[in-house]
Amino acid sequence: MTTHRRQHMTSRRRHALSFLLICACVGLAIFISIAVSHDLQVRKEAVTEAKAQSDIAESALSDAQNVMHDASNKEYMVFSKTKSSSDTANQAIGEAEVANSMASKAQARADEIYEKAMEVQAKAEAAPDYEGKNEAKGWALISLNAANRARNNANFANQYANVAMSKSTLTAGKVPFVQIAYQETKMLLNDANVELRSTMEAQNRAQNKANEAANASDTSVAKSKAAEAATYSAETKERASAVIDKASKGQDIYGDVVKTSGSINQLASDVTNAKYQVQQHYNETFDAIDDAESAIQSSLDAIQQAEEQEAAAIEAEKQAELEAEQARAVYDVPNSGDVLTPSGGVCYYNGHKETYYSERVLPGGALDIPGRYTDSNGLVRDADGYICVATDWSYIPKYSIVETSLGLGKVYDSGCPYGVVDIYTNW
């Protein structure tokens, strides 16, 4: 009985030990399973974190690249604005110089024509009091009005030319700002490009470390790689931020360039408009100058007409006095001395030889002697009292007045030797 009980107890102990052993094994298996599961979870989390850091780095790089792309476009646009602004400014300066030259020419010509108009007005006032004087004064007044119109237009041309020069100076003054802004933009983008390359390298490292973490079989290695990925991700973000900062500054400069370029274009447009006004007033100035010159010439012609009228009146008055004097004159044939006489037949007087021929021998019916008559001294005279004479017309031309020893004669006939005055008589 005792032996049986001992055997039974021993069996029970063995079952208990087996149960305990089984429980221990099961517990160990559970522990191991839990540990392995935890390790897997930790490794998975490390891989996920590494991937997340890689994605963050990639996103930061993408943002930086997008900003750089926009900034690069802006840099080209800044370059284009800089070139166009410089060209626009140079064009504005050229237009302003042309406008200034035109205005100066218009002013000089307007002042010149004004002086001429003043001179012709003075001449018109001093012209003889004949019919042409009033006409001369009228044209002189017209020329002066036209000259004043020319000067007014020239003054306007000068004012607009000054505007053009002022605006072109402002335009030229803004170009250096645009040029400096372009250089600053270029430097910022160069720096940003350097940072972008570093950003790409950091992002590549972060991605590589994430891949290494994903491929690691050891959790600690995965965690280490994930930590490295996080470090490179942070570096990527930092460098990407630097890229964005520099690129953004370049874009801000572009905004300033756009404003300045717009201001340059507006100023250049003002210059063009001012030049247009100068051209208009320049044309109007020379139109007025043409009018003034035409009126001046008309006034001078009228002055000349008045002077000719005066000269003709003076000549007519002298002629009338001479004719009256000749009509009153009484000519007596001297009996002796340096005069032609019927008995002498020849005398030398006033540098010529005098002879006579008689209408008794040569009636001279074909001679065109107006008012012909024979005076009491036997001298043939015309209606004006001139003694009728004959000459060689190459010596003394027909109808010339010649002084003879018997008084003033007039040439009606020819057929004499050169140097001879043949007096027509009734001797």
Image (cartoon, helix red, strand yellow):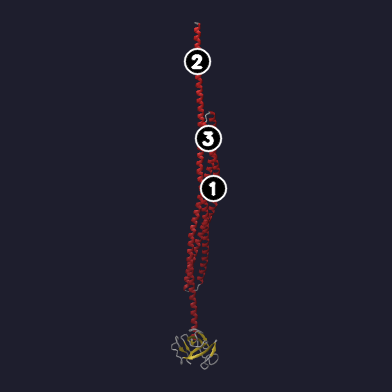
Spatial CA distance of label 2 from label 3 is: 52 Å
Residue 129 appears in the figure? no
Q: Earlier in the sequence, mark 1 or mark 2?
A: 2
Label 3 and label 1: CA atoms lie apart by: 38 Å
Mark 2 neighbour class, 10 Å CA radius: few under 14, some 14 to 19, many 20 or more: few
Which mark is nearer the camera, 2 or 3?
A: 2
Q: Is label 2 in a helix, a strand or a loop?
A: helix
Q: Dots 1 and 2: beta carbons under 8 Å?
A: no
Looking at the picture, which amino acid does disc 2 mark?
Ser
Let me know if residue 153 appears in the view: yes
Extreme residue toward the left, this view: 365
Toward the viewer: 409 or 362?
362
Badge 3 is on which residue? 208
Furthest residue toward bottom: 343
Badge 1 is on which residue? 182
Name the N-terminal-most of marks 3 and 1.
1
Element class at badge 3: helix
Amino acid type, label 1: Tyr
CA distance separating discs 1 and 2: 88 Å
Q: Which mark is residue 18?
A: 2
Q: Give percent across and percent down for residue 17.
A: 51, 14
Please report whichever mark, 2 or 3, sits nearer to the chain's N-terminal start. 2
Q: Position of residue 397 (x, y in %)?
A: 49, 84
